[in-house]
Image: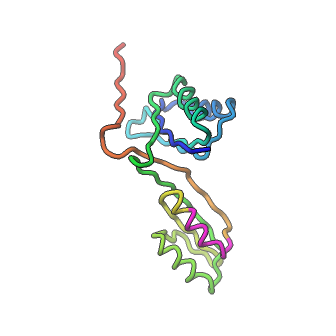
């Protein structure tokens, strides 16, 4: 099993994310991560999907998704030629004795303490999936009360692969 990251540009219409995830569900494909957000042009949404499977399954995913009506472009993001980030929000139980140790770990990872309560801290961390996994591993001795992760967002490096969508004349 391997993972591939696909970047889609789709029409910003109601139900587009549901149709895409439904295709994965119907075909039995696995989604490791999915993120979506409007682009600089509000008519389009950028969706980043990390999927796993063998080469045949991953090729089928790309072909099937590209056939959907709302999909304007689909590309595989090459890990060596792309930038990937994920956001994690981590709520950790923090007694007075634990607080400095947790803050020290957060500082090593350039994480931000975004909320302080009498019994907890909320930490914000952005980075690669491996950075977030390493951070969570170091918090293993502390009680993680809640964890929210956005999933991977990514863009290819440079301007060579920028997609411009031209509207056809009616």
- The residue sitting at the left extreme is 159
Q: What x and y, as percent, mark residue 9?
A: 45, 34
Residue situated in front as seen by the camera: 73 or 147: 73
Residue appearing at x 52%, y 22% in the figure: 69
User: Considering the image in quadrants, where does the N terminus appear?
Assistant: top right
Q: Which of the colour schemes (rainbow, by chain, secondary structure, one colour) is used?
A: rainbow
Residue appearing at x 58%, y 56% in the figure: 149
Q: What x and y, as percent, mark residue 62?
A: 53, 31
- Vertical comparison of 111 with 69: above or below: below
Instruction: Tell whether position 136 is magenta.
Output: yes
* Snapshot quadrant of residue 39: top left
- The residue sitting at the bottom extreme is 97
- The residue sitting at the top extreme is 170
Residue appearing at x 62%, y 35% in the figure: 21
Residue appearing at x 66%, y 76% in the figure: 141
Q: What x and y, as percent, mark residue 119?
A: 65, 77
- Vertical comparison of 42 with 130: above or below: above
- Vertical comparison of 130 with 43: above or below: below
Instruction: Tell whether position 47 is magenta.
Output: no
State the count of labels: 0
Magenta extent: 133-143
Residue situated in front as seen by the camera: 65 or 44: 65
* Residue 129 in view, yes or no: yes
* Residue 15 in view, yes or no: no
Q: What x and y, as percent, mark residue 85?
A: 47, 54
């Amino acid at each position: 099993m391997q993972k591939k990251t696909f970047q889609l540009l789709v029409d910003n219409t109601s139900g587009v994310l549901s149709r895409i995830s439904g295709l994965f569900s119907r075909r039995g494909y696995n989604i490791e991560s999915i993120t979506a957000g409007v682009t600089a042009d509000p008519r389009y949404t950028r969706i980043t999907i990390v999927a796993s499977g063998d080469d045949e399954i991953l090729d089928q995913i790309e072909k099937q998704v590209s056939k959907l009506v709302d999909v304007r472009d689909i590309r595989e993001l090459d890990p060596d030629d792309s930038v990937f980030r994920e956001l994690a929000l981590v709520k950790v139980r923090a007694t007075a004795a634990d607080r400095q140790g947790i803050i020290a770990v957060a500082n090593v990872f350039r994480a931000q303490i975004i909320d302080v309560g009498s019994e907890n801290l909320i930490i914000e961390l952005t980075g690669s999936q491996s950075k977030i996994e390493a951070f969570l591993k170091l918090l293993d001795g502390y009680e993680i009360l809640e964890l929210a992760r956005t999933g991977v967002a990514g863009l290819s490096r440079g301007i060579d692969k920028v997609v411009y969508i031209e509207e056809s004349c009616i």
